[in-house]
Image (cartoon, rainbow, N blue to C red):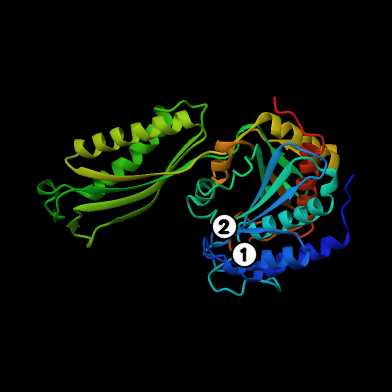
Amino acid sequence: MWQWENNMTEQLYRIRRHLHQFPELSFQEHRTCAYIIEQLKAWEIPYKQFGATGVIVDIYGESGKGLHLALRADIDALPIQEETALPFASRQPGIMHACGHDGHTTILLGAVYHLWKHRSQLSGMVRCIFQPGEEADGAAKQMIEQGVLRNPNIDTVVALHLWPYLPFGTVGIKSEAMTASCDDFVMTVHGKSGHGARPHQAVDAIAIAAEVVRALQFLATKRCDPVEPVVMHVGRIQAGTANNIVADQARLEGTIRTTTQHLREQVKQDFFTFVTHVVESFGGKVSIQYADGIPPVVNDEHVCNVLAQSIRKMIGTDAVYTLKSPSMGADDFGYFAQEVAGAYFRLGIRKEDTNTYDLHHPKFQFDEAILPVGAKILTQFAFDWLTEGVEIT
């Protein structure tokens, strides 16, 4: 079977450090795309540019027909000023790889190299997707609409994410819901302005907004099944012009997250009814913009089982954790998992002897020794899934 090339480890470190120094925001990853292509050309691996900044690599096995697998990595960065003091810290002011996408990209490149080199042992095909714009809603959806899962039709898709809440080198995975959906709202409460000394002559939009925030917590805890996780969060309020004027408008922005499509639809319907009733009961009116965003990532049980076997084979039987609950964060991999059987797993980066910062933190970083671990897992899974052709039951 295939073997890891030890000299590839240092190459992965070099690749990751370059990517980390030149992060790019969603749909602006032109330099990143060019650098990925540069690596593929150096290894003489054929590729296709997909859209403006995406790249795909199709590796056809030479042992006959079989299933069609996709491996996906996100490549974009975040609008965060880096505070790591790394020698290869971001050179782009206000932009940082604070979510580990530089690691994901590097890991997939390591898998691409080994899958291409040992393609004679594979049946079927593996499509490696370097996806732009994960941090922006709809990037995966756009790629799907443009045919990234067709020609040939993809049967299975897998992705990983570095995770600061698991011990270094371990993996967290579970079937069914892995992450939450992410729907956003903007509402404007309309009242009637007046003097703060005579509130009875006005309709206080700020007071009504406060009631809305309180009511949303009631909606989340008393109108939804308590065994199904749901988040209703107001993260921004804008209102008022002076301390002695009754505000005639209050703008609230927030997010709603669930892990099942059924609850997602129920919450959306209840949200409109509930908010409208609360606002009107206090004499105001409300306009609501509700954006259906990223769906939950729902893992396929059979794919998870095979993936767990591959991980144990590659890095040890004690390396796999069965996660008890989903994350209420979101990942647009959910769009892929909606279309075909998929598995999304967490690769632990927490080390006891160092500070491990959360995703999207300006001091987020990770030990580069995790890069070959992730690449080995993806490569081994592809071989296990495609070498003989795994029957999906």
Question: Disc 2 residue type?
Answer: Pro
Q: Quadrant of the N terminus?
A: top right
Label pair 2/1, CB-CB below 8 angstroms: yes
Near mark 1 (Cα within 10 A), the count class, few <14, some 14-19 or many ≥20, is many
Quadrant of the rendered image containing residue 5: bottom right
- Judging depth in this view, the residue of 211 and 150 nearest the camera is 150
Q: In screen coordinates, is 4 left or right of 287?
A: right
| Residue found farthest to the left | 201
* Residue at point 20%, 54% (across, down): 247
- Sequence-wise first label, 2 or 1: 1
Quadrant of the rendered image containing residue 324: top right
Secondary structure beneath label 1: helix
Q: Which residue position is annotated with label 1?
A: 33
Spot occupied by residue 57 in the image (x, y as percentages of width and height): 69, 54
* Residue at point 29%, 38% (across, down): 275
Q: Which residue position is annotated with label 2?
A: 132
Spot occupied by residue 378 in the image (x, y as percentages of width and height): 75, 46
* Residue at point 85%, 44% (across, down): 121
Question: Disc 1 residue type?
Answer: Cys
Spot occupied by residue 82 in the image (x, y as percentages of width and height): 59, 68
Q: Quadrant of the C terminus?
A: top right
Q: Relative to 183, does residue 196 appear above or below in the rendering?
A: below
Quadrant of the rendered image containing residue 335: top right
Near mark 2 (Cα within 10 A), the count class, few <14, some 14-19 or many ≥20, is many
